[in-house]
Protein backbone atom coordinates (compact mmCIF):
# COMPACT_ATOMS: atom_id res chain seq x y z
CA UNK A 1 0.00 0.00 0.00
CA UNK A 2 2.95 2.29 0.68
CA UNK A 3 4.19 1.66 -2.87
CA UNK A 4 0.75 2.55 -4.22
CA UNK A 5 0.73 5.71 -2.11
CA UNK A 6 4.14 6.71 -3.42
CA UNK A 7 3.15 5.91 -7.01
CA UNK A 8 -0.01 8.02 -6.77
CA UNK A 9 1.94 10.80 -5.04
CA UNK A 10 4.35 10.92 -7.97
CA UNK A 11 1.53 10.97 -10.55
CA UNK A 12 -0.33 13.66 -8.62
CA UNK A 13 2.78 15.78 -8.06
CA UNK A 14 3.86 15.64 -11.70
CA UNK A 15 0.33 16.58 -12.80
CA UNK A 16 0.20 19.49 -10.34
CA UNK A 17 3.69 20.67 -11.35
CA UNK A 18 2.86 20.65 -15.06
CA UNK A 19 -0.53 22.28 -14.49
CA UNK A 20 1.12 25.10 -12.53
CA UNK A 21 3.76 25.40 -15.22
CA UNK A 22 1.07 25.70 -17.94
CA UNK A 23 -0.82 28.30 -15.91
CA UNK A 24 2.40 30.27 -15.29
CA UNK A 25 3.59 30.35 -18.89
CA UNK A 26 0.52 30.47 -21.11
CA UNK A 27 -2.49 32.77 -21.30
CA UNK A 28 -5.40 31.39 -19.28
CA UNK A 29 -8.69 32.67 -17.91
CA UNK A 30 -6.86 33.48 -14.67
CA UNK A 31 -5.35 36.87 -13.99
CA UNK A 32 -1.73 37.25 -15.19
CA UNK A 33 -0.98 38.58 -11.70
CA UNK A 34 -1.28 35.02 -10.42
CA UNK A 35 1.65 33.86 -12.59
CA UNK A 36 4.18 34.30 -9.78
CA UNK A 37 2.08 32.07 -7.51
CA UNK A 38 1.77 29.40 -10.19
CA UNK A 39 5.53 29.56 -10.69
CA UNK A 40 6.13 29.35 -6.95
CA UNK A 41 3.82 26.34 -6.73
CA UNK A 42 5.57 24.67 -9.63
CA UNK A 43 8.95 25.18 -7.98
CA UNK A 44 7.73 23.78 -4.67
CA UNK A 45 6.34 20.65 -6.30
CA UNK A 46 9.51 20.27 -8.37
CA UNK A 47 11.45 20.35 -5.13
CA UNK A 48 9.19 17.63 -3.68
CA UNK A 49 10.04 15.54 -6.75
CA UNK A 50 13.75 15.98 -6.05
CA UNK A 51 14.36 18.13 -9.09
CA UNK A 52 16.09 20.85 -7.10
CA UNK A 53 18.72 18.40 -5.86
CA UNK A 54 22.15 18.15 -7.45
CA UNK A 55 22.21 16.26 -10.76
CA UNK A 56 24.36 13.52 -9.21
CA UNK A 57 22.09 13.06 -6.18
CA UNK A 58 20.97 9.40 -5.98
CA UNK A 59 17.47 10.32 -4.74
CA UNK A 60 16.93 12.66 -7.68
CA UNK A 61 18.21 10.00 -10.08
CA UNK A 62 16.09 7.25 -8.55
CA UNK A 63 12.94 9.38 -8.79
CA UNK A 64 13.76 10.41 -12.38
CA UNK A 65 14.34 6.80 -13.46
CA UNK A 66 11.09 5.68 -11.81
CA UNK A 67 9.07 8.51 -13.35
CA UNK A 68 10.42 7.85 -16.82
CA UNK A 69 10.17 4.07 -16.45
CA UNK A 70 6.53 4.28 -15.37
CA UNK A 71 5.71 6.84 -18.07
CA UNK A 72 4.59 9.40 -15.50
CA UNK A 73 7.26 12.05 -15.93
CA UNK A 74 4.89 14.45 -17.71
CA UNK A 75 1.41 15.79 -17.09
CA UNK A 76 -1.61 15.41 -19.30
CA UNK A 77 -2.36 18.89 -20.55
CA UNK A 78 -2.74 17.91 -24.19
CA UNK A 79 -4.06 20.80 -26.29
CA UNK A 80 -4.44 22.78 -23.08
CA UNK A 81 -5.12 25.42 -22.06
CA UNK A 82 -5.25 26.33 -25.76
CA UNK A 83 -4.53 24.43 -28.95
CA UNK A 84 -0.99 25.47 -29.95
CA UNK A 85 -0.19 27.30 -33.14
CA UNK A 86 0.94 25.45 -36.18
CA UNK A 87 4.62 25.66 -37.09
CA UNK A 88 6.50 24.99 -40.28
CA UNK A 89 10.09 24.66 -41.32
CA UNK A 90 11.18 25.60 -44.83
CA UNK A 91 14.70 25.23 -46.17
CA UNK A 92 16.27 27.49 -48.80
CA UNK A 93 19.12 25.62 -50.46
CA UNK A 94 21.74 27.86 -52.06
CA UNK A 95 24.15 26.48 -54.68
CA UNK A 96 27.51 27.76 -55.92
CA UNK A 97 26.05 28.70 -59.33
CA UNK A 98 23.50 30.99 -57.66
CA UNK A 99 20.68 28.50 -58.00
CA UNK A 100 18.20 28.23 -55.14
CA UNK A 101 15.87 25.35 -54.24
CA UNK A 102 13.25 24.96 -51.56
CA UNK A 103 12.73 21.90 -49.38
CA UNK A 104 10.57 20.90 -46.45
CA UNK A 105 11.28 18.03 -43.99
CA UNK A 106 10.58 14.62 -45.51
CA UNK A 107 9.09 11.64 -43.69
CA UNK A 108 8.23 8.12 -44.78
CA UNK A 109 4.82 7.83 -43.18
CA UNK A 110 1.95 9.80 -41.68
CA UNK A 111 2.93 8.46 -38.25
CA UNK A 112 6.35 10.11 -38.53
CA UNK A 113 4.65 13.24 -39.89
CA UNK A 114 2.62 13.47 -36.67
CA UNK A 115 5.81 13.14 -34.66
CA UNK A 116 7.54 15.81 -36.74
CA UNK A 117 4.68 18.17 -35.98
CA UNK A 118 5.28 17.57 -32.27
CA UNK A 119 8.99 18.27 -32.78
CA UNK A 120 8.22 21.63 -34.43
CA UNK A 121 5.99 22.49 -31.45
CA UNK A 122 8.89 21.63 -29.14
CA UNK A 123 11.30 23.79 -31.13
CA UNK A 124 8.89 26.69 -30.80
CA UNK A 125 8.50 26.07 -27.07
CA UNK A 126 12.24 25.85 -26.45
CA UNK A 127 13.34 29.03 -24.74
CA UNK A 128 17.02 28.09 -24.57
CA UNK A 129 18.31 29.55 -27.83
CA UNK A 130 21.41 27.29 -28.31
CA UNK A 131 19.21 24.17 -27.94
CA UNK A 132 16.65 25.49 -30.44
CA UNK A 133 19.43 26.34 -32.86
CA UNK A 134 20.90 22.85 -32.45
CA UNK A 135 17.53 21.19 -33.11
CA UNK A 136 17.01 23.23 -36.29
CA UNK A 137 20.60 22.53 -37.32
CA UNK A 138 20.11 18.78 -37.04
CA UNK A 139 16.95 18.94 -39.14
CA UNK A 140 18.81 21.08 -41.66
CA UNK A 141 21.70 18.62 -41.69
CA UNK A 142 19.34 15.81 -42.67
CA UNK A 143 18.26 17.92 -45.68
CA UNK A 144 21.88 18.72 -46.55
CA UNK A 145 22.71 15.00 -46.62
CA UNK A 146 20.19 14.70 -49.47
CA UNK A 147 21.64 17.78 -51.19
CA UNK A 148 25.39 17.70 -50.44
CA UNK A 149 26.16 20.15 -53.26
CA UNK A 150 24.30 22.97 -51.56
CA UNK A 151 26.79 25.58 -50.37
CA UNK A 152 24.52 26.91 -47.67
CA UNK A 153 21.05 26.28 -46.32
CA UNK A 154 18.76 28.86 -44.80
CA UNK A 155 16.26 27.34 -42.37
CA UNK A 156 13.12 29.41 -41.95
CA UNK A 157 11.01 28.46 -38.95
CA UNK A 158 7.56 29.95 -39.24
CA UNK A 159 4.35 30.21 -37.29
CA UNK A 160 0.90 29.90 -38.82
CA UNK A 161 -1.86 32.32 -37.98
CA UNK A 162 -4.98 30.17 -38.09
CA UNK A 163 -8.20 31.95 -39.06
CA UNK A 164 -11.24 31.84 -36.79
CA UNK A 165 -14.32 30.00 -38.14
CA UNK A 166 -15.88 33.40 -38.95
CA UNK A 167 -12.78 34.60 -40.81
CA UNK A 168 -12.52 31.32 -42.69
CA UNK A 169 -16.14 31.62 -43.78
CA UNK A 170 -15.21 35.05 -45.22
CA UNK A 171 -12.48 33.40 -47.29
CA UNK A 172 -9.45 34.03 -45.08
CA UNK A 173 -6.82 31.24 -45.10
CA UNK A 174 -3.99 30.55 -42.69
CA UNK A 175 -0.91 32.73 -43.15
CA UNK A 176 2.64 32.02 -42.08
CA UNK A 177 5.24 34.43 -40.79
CA UNK A 178 8.90 33.68 -40.01
CA UNK A 179 9.82 33.35 -36.35
CA UNK A 180 13.46 32.28 -36.54
CA UNK A 181 15.84 32.19 -39.49
CA UNK A 182 19.21 30.45 -39.42
CA UNK A 183 21.93 30.13 -42.06
CA UNK A 184 23.97 26.95 -42.04
CA UNK A 185 26.89 25.69 -44.08
CA UNK A 186 28.02 22.09 -43.93
CA UNK A 187 31.16 20.39 -45.17
CA UNK A 188 31.44 16.69 -45.86
CA UNK A 189 34.13 15.99 -43.32
CA UNK A 190 33.49 18.61 -40.70
CA UNK A 191 29.96 20.01 -40.34
CA UNK A 192 30.31 23.69 -39.53
CA UNK A 193 27.71 26.27 -38.79
CA UNK A 194 27.85 29.94 -39.53
CA UNK A 195 26.54 32.41 -37.05
CA UNK A 196 22.80 32.70 -37.59
CA UNK B 1 -9.20 5.85 12.17
CA UNK B 2 -8.89 2.08 12.20
CA UNK B 3 -12.28 1.82 10.56
CA UNK B 4 -11.17 4.23 7.85
CA UNK B 5 -8.03 2.21 7.25
CA UNK B 6 -10.05 -0.96 6.84
CA UNK B 7 -12.48 0.73 4.49
CA UNK B 8 -9.49 1.93 2.47
CA UNK B 9 -8.22 -1.64 2.32
CA UNK B 10 -11.57 -2.86 1.04
CA UNK B 11 -11.52 -0.08 -1.53
CA UNK B 12 -8.01 -0.86 -2.69
CA UNK B 13 -8.32 -4.64 -2.69
CA UNK B 14 -11.71 -5.46 -4.22
CA UNK B 15 -12.21 -8.97 -5.60
CA UNK B 16 -12.03 -8.80 -9.38
CA UNK B 17 -11.62 -11.16 -12.29
CA UNK B 18 -8.66 -10.99 -14.66
CA UNK B 19 -10.70 -9.89 -17.67
CA UNK B 20 -9.42 -6.33 -17.33
CA UNK B 21 -5.84 -7.57 -17.46
CA UNK B 22 -6.54 -9.55 -20.64
CA UNK B 23 -8.00 -6.42 -22.25
CA UNK B 24 -5.03 -4.31 -21.16
CA UNK B 25 -2.51 -6.92 -22.34
CA UNK B 26 -4.09 -7.34 -25.77
CA UNK B 27 -4.69 -3.60 -26.27
CA UNK B 28 -1.17 -2.57 -25.29
CA UNK B 29 0.37 -5.42 -27.30
CA UNK B 30 -1.49 -4.23 -30.42
CA UNK B 31 -0.25 -0.74 -29.61
CA UNK B 32 3.38 -1.91 -29.41
CA UNK B 33 3.13 -3.83 -32.70
CA UNK B 34 1.49 -0.87 -34.46
CA UNK B 35 4.12 1.48 -33.00
CA UNK B 36 6.84 -0.68 -34.56
CA UNK B 37 5.04 -1.01 -37.88
CA UNK B 38 4.31 2.71 -38.09
CA UNK B 39 8.02 3.49 -37.69
CA UNK B 40 9.32 0.55 -39.74
CA UNK B 41 10.52 2.74 -42.64
CA UNK B 42 12.13 5.36 -40.38
CA UNK B 43 13.40 3.16 -37.52
CA UNK B 44 17.09 3.00 -38.48
CA UNK B 45 17.13 6.63 -39.65
CA UNK B 46 15.62 7.79 -36.37
CA UNK B 47 18.18 6.07 -34.19
CA UNK B 48 21.29 5.83 -36.30
CA UNK B 49 23.97 8.46 -35.93
CA UNK B 50 25.23 7.77 -39.45
CA UNK B 51 21.99 7.70 -41.48
CA UNK B 52 19.98 10.54 -42.93
CA UNK B 53 17.54 11.09 -40.09
CA UNK B 54 15.19 13.82 -38.98
CA UNK B 55 16.93 14.29 -35.67
CA UNK B 56 19.91 12.56 -34.16
CA UNK B 57 19.50 10.57 -31.00
CA UNK B 58 22.74 11.95 -29.54
CA UNK B 59 21.06 15.33 -28.99
CA UNK B 60 17.94 13.76 -27.44
CA UNK B 61 20.04 11.51 -25.25
CA UNK B 62 22.18 14.46 -24.14
CA UNK B 63 19.01 16.31 -23.10
CA UNK B 64 17.81 13.12 -21.39
CA UNK B 65 21.07 12.91 -19.44
CA UNK B 66 20.26 16.30 -17.95
CA UNK B 67 17.40 14.50 -16.16
CA UNK B 68 19.39 11.41 -15.28
CA UNK B 69 22.17 9.34 -16.80
CA UNK B 70 20.34 6.20 -15.70
CA UNK B 71 17.24 6.47 -17.93
CA UNK B 72 17.33 3.68 -20.55
CA UNK B 73 18.12 4.68 -24.12
CA UNK B 74 19.02 3.17 -27.47
CA UNK B 75 22.59 4.43 -27.05
CA UNK B 76 23.12 1.79 -24.34
CA UNK B 77 22.13 -1.00 -26.72
CA UNK B 78 24.38 0.40 -29.46
CA UNK B 79 27.28 0.67 -27.02
CA UNK B 80 26.70 -2.90 -25.82
CA UNK B 81 26.61 -4.05 -29.44
CA UNK B 82 29.84 -2.20 -30.20
CA UNK B 83 31.49 -3.91 -27.22
CA UNK B 84 30.44 -7.28 -28.72
CA UNK B 85 31.59 -6.25 -32.20
CA UNK B 86 28.09 -5.72 -33.63
CA UNK B 87 27.54 -2.60 -35.71
CA UNK B 88 24.90 0.05 -35.07
CA UNK B 89 22.60 -0.87 -37.96
CA UNK B 90 22.48 -4.52 -36.85
CA UNK B 91 21.72 -3.53 -33.25
CA UNK B 92 18.90 -1.27 -34.42
CA UNK B 93 17.42 -3.91 -36.72
CA UNK B 94 17.60 -6.57 -33.99
CA UNK B 95 15.98 -4.12 -31.53
CA UNK B 96 13.08 -3.51 -33.90
CA UNK B 97 12.51 -7.23 -34.49
CA UNK B 98 12.81 -7.98 -30.78
CA UNK B 99 10.21 -5.33 -29.95
CA UNK B 100 7.85 -6.69 -32.62
CA UNK B 101 8.37 -10.23 -31.31
CA UNK B 102 7.79 -9.11 -27.71
CA UNK B 103 4.63 -7.36 -28.88
CA UNK B 104 3.34 -10.53 -30.54
CA UNK B 105 4.23 -12.68 -27.52
CA UNK B 106 2.36 -10.22 -25.31
CA UNK B 107 -0.59 -10.28 -27.70
CA UNK B 108 -1.04 -14.04 -27.47
CA UNK B 109 0.12 -14.23 -23.87
CA UNK B 110 3.16 -16.41 -24.51
CA UNK B 111 5.82 -15.80 -21.85
CA UNK B 112 3.63 -12.84 -20.90
CA UNK B 113 5.74 -11.46 -18.07
CA UNK B 114 9.05 -11.71 -19.94
CA UNK B 115 7.45 -10.26 -23.07
CA UNK B 116 6.04 -7.35 -21.03
CA UNK B 117 9.45 -6.62 -19.49
CA UNK B 118 11.34 -6.84 -22.80
CA UNK B 119 8.71 -4.73 -24.58
CA UNK B 120 8.68 -2.16 -21.77
CA UNK B 121 12.48 -1.76 -21.75
CA UNK B 122 12.90 -1.64 -25.53
CA UNK B 123 9.92 0.68 -26.00
CA UNK B 124 11.25 2.95 -23.26
CA UNK B 125 14.71 3.02 -24.88
CA UNK B 126 13.17 3.89 -28.24
CA UNK B 127 10.85 6.55 -26.86
CA UNK B 128 13.51 8.18 -24.71
CA UNK B 129 16.03 8.31 -27.55
CA UNK B 130 13.48 10.07 -29.76
CA UNK B 131 11.87 12.15 -27.02
CA UNK B 132 11.69 15.19 -29.28
CA UNK B 133 9.53 13.19 -31.69
CA UNK B 134 7.20 11.64 -29.16
CA UNK B 135 3.67 12.61 -28.22
CA UNK B 136 1.03 11.49 -25.73
CA UNK B 137 0.53 8.04 -27.18
CA UNK B 138 4.11 7.00 -26.34
CA UNK B 139 3.66 8.02 -22.71
CA UNK B 140 0.44 6.05 -22.45
CA UNK B 141 2.04 2.98 -24.02
CA UNK B 142 4.86 3.23 -21.48
CA UNK B 143 2.27 3.47 -18.69
CA UNK B 144 0.42 0.42 -20.05
CA UNK B 145 3.61 -1.62 -20.32
CA UNK B 146 4.66 -0.61 -16.82
CA UNK B 147 1.35 -1.85 -15.38
CA UNK B 148 1.65 -5.06 -17.38
CA UNK B 149 5.12 -5.63 -15.94
CA UNK B 150 3.85 -5.46 -12.36
CA UNK B 151 0.35 -6.94 -12.86
CA UNK B 152 -0.47 -10.55 -11.87
CA UNK B 153 0.04 -12.13 -15.30
CA UNK B 154 -0.95 -14.40 -16.95
CA UNK B 155 -4.64 -13.72 -17.38
CA UNK B 156 -7.09 -16.46 -18.40
CA UNK B 157 -6.90 -15.60 -22.13
CA UNK B 158 -3.11 -15.92 -22.27
CA UNK B 159 -1.47 -19.00 -23.78
CA UNK B 160 0.68 -19.17 -20.63
CA UNK B 161 -2.36 -19.86 -18.53
CA UNK B 162 -3.45 -22.78 -20.77
CA UNK B 163 0.05 -24.22 -20.83
CA UNK B 164 0.80 -23.95 -17.13
CA UNK B 165 -2.70 -25.05 -16.01
CA UNK B 166 -2.20 -22.98 -12.88
CA UNK B 167 -5.19 -21.94 -10.82
CA UNK B 168 -6.81 -18.55 -10.98
CA UNK B 169 -4.83 -15.54 -9.78
CA UNK B 170 -5.68 -13.97 -6.45
CA UNK B 171 -8.81 -11.92 -7.16
CA UNK B 172 -7.91 -9.26 -4.61
CA UNK B 173 -4.52 -8.81 -6.22
CA UNK B 174 -6.27 -8.44 -9.58
CA UNK B 175 -8.63 -5.91 -8.04
CA UNK B 176 -5.73 -3.99 -6.49
CA UNK B 177 -3.90 -3.62 -9.79
CA UNK B 178 -7.08 -2.64 -11.58
CA UNK B 179 -7.72 -0.04 -8.89
CA UNK B 180 -4.29 1.53 -9.52
CA UNK B 181 -5.13 1.84 -13.21
CA UNK B 182 -8.54 3.33 -12.36
CA UNK B 183 -7.06 5.93 -10.01
CA UNK B 184 -4.36 6.80 -12.52
CA UNK B 185 -6.94 7.24 -15.28
CA UNK B 186 -9.00 9.51 -13.03
CA UNK B 187 -5.94 11.71 -12.41
CA UNK B 188 -5.16 11.81 -16.14
CA UNK B 189 -8.64 13.03 -17.04
CA UNK B 190 -8.97 15.38 -14.08
CA UNK B 191 -5.77 17.26 -14.82
CA UNK B 192 -6.34 17.11 -18.58
CA UNK B 193 -9.79 18.58 -17.93
CA UNK B 194 -8.86 21.41 -15.57
CA UNK B 195 -6.01 22.62 -17.78
CA UNK B 196 -8.47 22.77 -20.69
CA UNK B 197 -11.00 24.60 -18.51
CA UNK B 198 -8.36 27.28 -17.92
CA UNK B 199 -8.19 28.12 -21.63
CA UNK B 200 -10.70 30.60 -23.00
CA UNK B 201 -10.72 28.74 -26.32
CA UNK B 202 -12.32 25.70 -24.71
CA UNK B 203 -15.33 27.75 -23.64
CA UNK B 204 -16.14 29.40 -26.96
CA UNK B 205 -15.37 26.48 -29.27
CA UNK B 206 -12.24 28.01 -30.81
CA UNK B 207 -10.03 25.19 -29.55
CA UNK B 208 -12.09 22.48 -31.25
CA UNK B 209 -11.94 24.44 -34.50
CA UNK B 210 -8.19 24.96 -34.20
CA UNK B 211 -7.59 21.31 -33.27
CA UNK B 212 -9.49 20.11 -36.34
CA UNK B 213 -8.16 22.81 -38.68
CA UNK B 214 -4.52 22.61 -37.67
CA UNK B 215 -2.20 20.49 -39.82
CA UNK B 216 -1.44 17.56 -39.54
CA UNK B 217 -4.75 16.88 -37.75
CA UNK B 218 -6.84 18.38 -40.55
CA UNK B 219 -8.49 15.15 -41.67
CA UNK B 220 -11.83 16.85 -42.32
CA UNK B 221 -11.88 19.43 -45.12
CA UNK B 222 -12.33 22.91 -43.61
CA UNK B 223 -15.22 23.61 -45.99
CA UNK B 224 -17.08 20.72 -44.40
CA UNK B 225 -15.91 21.69 -40.93
CA UNK B 226 -17.31 25.19 -41.21
CA UNK B 227 -20.80 23.77 -41.75
CA UNK B 228 -20.77 22.42 -38.20
CA UNK B 229 -19.22 25.49 -36.55
CA UNK B 230 -22.39 26.02 -34.51
CA UNK B 231 -21.72 22.92 -32.43
CA UNK B 232 -18.07 23.73 -31.61
CA UNK B 233 -18.85 25.60 -28.37
CA UNK B 234 -21.10 22.79 -27.09
CA UNK B 235 -18.56 20.19 -28.18
CA UNK B 236 -15.60 21.86 -26.47
CA UNK B 237 -17.49 22.57 -23.24
CA UNK B 238 -18.56 18.90 -23.28
CA UNK B 239 -14.92 17.81 -23.57
CA UNK B 240 -14.00 19.98 -20.55
CA UNK B 241 -16.88 18.65 -18.48
CA UNK B 242 -16.34 15.04 -19.53
CA UNK B 243 -12.66 15.07 -18.64
CA UNK B 244 -12.92 17.05 -15.41
CA UNK B 245 -16.02 15.17 -14.23
CA UNK B 246 -14.65 11.72 -15.13
CA UNK B 247 -12.96 11.26 -11.75
CA UNK B 248 -16.28 11.79 -9.95
CA UNK B 249 -19.01 10.46 -12.22
CA UNK B 250 -17.31 7.24 -13.33
CA UNK B 251 -17.69 5.78 -9.82
CA UNK B 252 -21.40 6.37 -9.37
CA UNK B 253 -23.67 3.61 -10.66
CA UNK B 254 -26.16 6.16 -12.01
CA UNK B 255 -23.70 8.11 -14.16
CA UNK B 256 -21.07 5.48 -14.90
CA UNK B 257 -22.45 4.18 -18.18
CA UNK B 258 -23.14 7.68 -19.52
CA UNK B 259 -19.61 8.88 -18.72
CA UNK B 260 -17.97 5.70 -19.93
CA UNK B 261 -19.84 5.72 -23.25
CA UNK B 262 -19.30 9.47 -23.75
CA UNK B 263 -15.55 9.18 -23.12
CA UNK B 264 -15.25 6.25 -25.53
CA UNK B 265 -17.21 8.25 -28.13
CA UNK B 266 -14.87 11.22 -27.56
CA UNK B 267 -11.79 9.07 -28.19
CA UNK B 268 -13.31 7.45 -31.27
CA UNK B 269 -14.14 10.95 -32.51
CA UNK B 270 -10.59 12.20 -31.86
CA UNK B 271 -9.16 9.14 -33.62
CA UNK B 272 -11.28 9.54 -36.74
CA UNK B 273 -11.47 13.33 -36.99
CA UNK B 274 -7.81 14.05 -36.20
CA UNK B 275 -6.16 10.88 -37.46
CA UNK B 276 -4.83 10.03 -34.00
CA UNK B 277 -5.68 6.35 -34.30
CA UNK B 278 -3.02 5.02 -31.95
CA UNK B 279 -3.89 7.61 -29.32
CA UNK B 280 -7.56 6.65 -29.57
CA UNK B 281 -6.67 2.96 -29.33
CA UNK B 282 -4.57 3.30 -26.20
CA UNK B 283 -7.14 5.48 -24.42
CA UNK B 284 -10.00 3.15 -25.33
CA UNK B 285 -7.92 0.21 -24.09
CA UNK B 286 -7.28 1.96 -20.77
CA UNK B 287 -10.93 2.86 -20.33
CA UNK B 288 -12.27 -0.58 -21.12
CA UNK B 289 -9.63 -2.25 -18.95
CA UNK B 290 -10.25 0.11 -16.03
CA UNK B 291 -13.98 0.69 -16.07
CA UNK B 292 -15.29 -1.71 -18.72
CA UNK B 293 -17.03 -5.05 -18.31
CA UNK B 294 -16.76 -6.60 -14.88
CA UNK B 295 -16.41 -3.29 -13.07
CA UNK B 296 -19.04 -2.84 -10.40
CA UNK B 297 -17.86 -0.42 -7.80
CA UNK B 298 -19.62 -0.40 -4.47
CA UNK B 299 -18.63 0.56 -0.96
CA UNK B 300 -20.71 -2.40 0.27
CA UNK B 301 -19.49 -5.96 -0.05
CA UNK B 302 -21.79 -8.09 -2.24
CA UNK B 303 -23.81 -10.88 -0.62
CA UNK B 304 -24.10 -14.34 -2.18
CA UNK B 305 -24.95 -17.94 -1.32
CA UNK B 306 -22.41 -19.67 0.93
CA UNK B 307 -20.33 -22.38 -0.69
CA UNK B 308 -17.86 -24.64 1.11
CA UNK B 309 -14.42 -24.58 -0.50
CA UNK B 310 -11.00 -25.84 0.51
CA UNK B 311 -9.12 -23.71 3.12
CA UNK B 312 -6.27 -23.58 0.61
CA UNK B 313 -8.47 -21.34 -1.54
CA UNK B 314 -8.15 -18.52 0.98
CA UNK B 315 -6.59 -15.60 -0.82
CA UNK B 316 -3.59 -13.61 0.26
CA UNK B 317 -5.82 -10.71 1.26
CA UNK B 318 -8.09 -12.94 3.38
CA UNK B 319 -5.09 -14.45 5.14
CA UNK B 320 -3.77 -10.99 5.82
CA UNK B 321 -7.05 -9.88 7.34
CA UNK B 322 -7.17 -13.04 9.44
CA UNK B 323 -3.72 -12.34 10.76
CA UNK B 324 -4.55 -8.77 11.78
CA UNK B 325 -5.63 -8.40 15.36
CA UNK B 326 -7.43 -5.13 14.78
CA UNK B 327 -9.47 -6.42 11.84
CA UNK B 328 -12.15 -8.19 13.84
CA UNK B 329 -15.04 -6.01 12.89
CA UNK B 330 -15.88 -2.87 10.91
CA UNK B 331 -18.00 -0.02 12.20
CA UNK B 332 -21.03 0.73 10.08
CA UNK B 333 -21.24 4.37 8.95
Image (cartoon, helix red, strand yellow):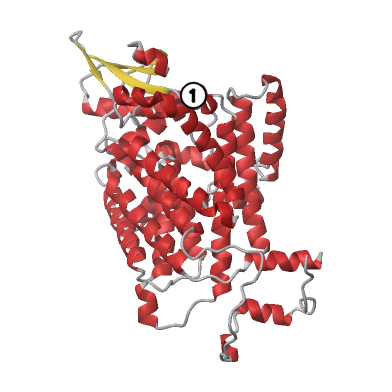
> From where the camera sits, is residue A74 visible?
no
**Residue A115 at x, y = what percent?**
37, 36
Q: Quadrant of residue B46?
A: top left
| Number of numbered discs on residues | 1
| Mark 1 burial class by Cα count in 10 Å: few <14, some 14-19, many 20+ | few
Q: Is residue B229 left or right of residue A30?
A: left
Identify whether B56 is placed above or below B175.
Answer: above
Residue at (49, 66) in percent of width and height: B294
> From where the camera sits, is residue B19 visible?
yes
> Disc 1 is attached to a residue of which chain?
A
Identify whether B285 is placed above or below A172.
Answer: below
Residue with the mark numbered 1? A130
Closer-to-camera residue (A161/B220): B220
Outermost front residue: B254
Q: Quadrant of residue B26?
A: bottom left
Q: Is residue B172 left or right of residue B166?
A: right
Q: Quadrant of residue B213?
A: top left
Identify whether B327 is placed above or below B101.
Answer: below
Identify whether B292 is placed above or below A141.
Answer: below
Q: Is residue B195 left or right of residue B56?
A: right
Residue at (59, 62) in percent of width and height: B297
**Residue B60 at x, y = what percent?**
44, 38
**Residue A116 at x, y = what percent?**
35, 33
Outermost top residue: A98
Work out which quarter of the rendered image holds the C terminus of chain A and state it.
top left
Outermost right residue: B1
Residue at (62, 68) in percent of width and height: B13
Tell me the element at label 1: helix
Closer-to-camera residue (B293/A80): B293
Work out which quarter of the rendered image holds the N terminus of chain A and state it.
bottom right
**Residue A152 at x, y = what percent?**
29, 16
Amino acid sequence: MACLGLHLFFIFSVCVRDTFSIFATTPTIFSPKLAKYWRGGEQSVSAALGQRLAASNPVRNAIAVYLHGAGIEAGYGFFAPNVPNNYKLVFELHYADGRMEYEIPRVSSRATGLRLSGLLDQIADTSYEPLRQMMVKILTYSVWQDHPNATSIRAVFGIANLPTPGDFAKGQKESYEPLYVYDFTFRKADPKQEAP
Amino acid sequence: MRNLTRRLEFFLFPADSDHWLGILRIGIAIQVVLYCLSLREDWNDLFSLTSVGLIKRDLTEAVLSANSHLIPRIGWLVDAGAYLGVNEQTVLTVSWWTLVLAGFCLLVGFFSRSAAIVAAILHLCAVKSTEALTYGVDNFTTIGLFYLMIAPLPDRWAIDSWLSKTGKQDQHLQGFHRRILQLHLCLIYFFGGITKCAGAGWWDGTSVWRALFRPPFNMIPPELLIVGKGIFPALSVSVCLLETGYSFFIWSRKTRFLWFAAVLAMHIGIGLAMGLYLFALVMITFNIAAFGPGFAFSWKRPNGPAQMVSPGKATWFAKRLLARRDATFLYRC
